[in-house]
Image (tube, helix red, strand yellow):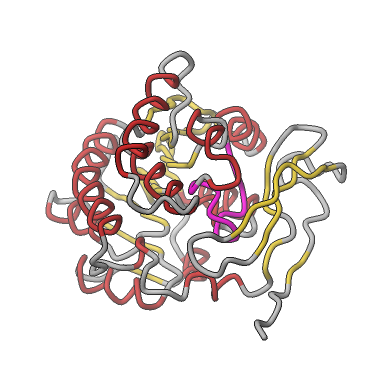
Amino acid sequence: MKQKAMTKKVEVCPICSSEQSSLHINTRDYFYSKDAFSISKCQECGFLYTNPIPLNAGKYYETDEYLSHNTSSGGLISKVYSLLRKINIARKYKLVSQNSSGKTILDVGCGTGELLRYFKEKGWTTTGIEPNEKARNLAIKNSGGSVYEESYIDKLTPHSFDIITLWHVLEHVEDLNKRMVELKGLLKSGGAIIFALPNISSPDAVKYGQFWAGLDVPRHLYHFNESSFKKLVNKHGLKLTSAIPMKLDSYYVSMLSEKYMGNTLNIPAAFLNGAISNIKARKNNNYSSMIFVVRNI
């Protein structure tokens, strides 16, 4: 018999500390364990968060199919992910360069280090944080070092980075407010933090509902849209200065969502739904994933 995962209830909203919440949606870890989870909605500020959360979250990452930690998966979706990652590295470099006055970068949740390697080849001083040991070892090999476990973030020199990046990482961090304080403390005056996040209010999220791959429970503990992210940023004395779409994500997320619905080979539907999502998102810049640029007030 499968052992039931041990969990703990989230008693207060991570953004506004309200104790009043309601059920938003029931869903599952369709990617790996098939365990059931729920997402709560704060009745005060509207923030959505996985509740309860697993006590041993690490076991939900322990699969070779977890793509941010893997460079060798051979399936179609893995190949699409790898292609998009290569395309996005150059785009990320351009975006980071446009928002940084210097060349010191900290990439939190750096995965297997391909982005750090790209920056290092361009003459940047690079540092990475990666909690997964297997991915971290690959990142050290790929980027030439300066990649550390998560606890090392407390040992980094304050105000030492021109730019800090978190590409689909913040939604995984258990102590959300602690991490925001840490990031602000590591940023140089005039520096910027770049966050990439799934958008729970996007048209594809609405269409797929409990099957939307962007939920990715329980690895994703928080489910942001621009409004809730802005509230978090303002709480920590930071300012959201840009909101930039990641238009390719809608296609990849739609492919996974179709798979979770049992439509593994329905590539045309996934492509169509990804395109429809992007078209609808033009009205209010509400895409499947968003990049947010944040600075000190």
Vertical placement of residue 93 versus 220, above or below = above
Q: Residue at x 51, y 50 (%)?
A: 183
Q: Which residue is depicted at the point 42% across and 53% down?
A: 259
In the image as oriented, which residue stretches furthest toward the bottom? 1
Q: Is residue 206 left or right of residue 267?
A: right
Residue sticking out furthest to the top: 283
Left or right: 38 as drawn, with respect to 199? right
Residue at position x 38%, y 54% in the image: 264
- Please indicate whether residue 27 sits to the left or right of residue 77 in the image: right
- Image quadrant where one finds the C terminus: top right
As drawn, the residue found furthest toward the right would be 20
- Judging depth in this view, the residue of 59 and 120 nearest the camera is 59
Horizontal side of 262 relative to 233 (left or right) equals: left
The residue depicted at 44 percent of the width and 21 percent of the height is 281
What residue range appears in magenta? 213-224
Q: What secondary structure is the stretch in magenta mostly built from?
A: loop
State the image coordinates of residue 234 (x, y, percent, origin top left): 63, 31
Quarter of image, res 72: bottom left
In percent of width and height, residue 150 lies at 48, 68
Q: Nearer the viewer, residue 289 or 193?
A: 289
Q: Position of residue 261 (x, y in %)?
A: 50, 50
Viewer-proximal residue among 233 and 65: 65
**Which quadrant of the structure image shows residue 96?**
top left
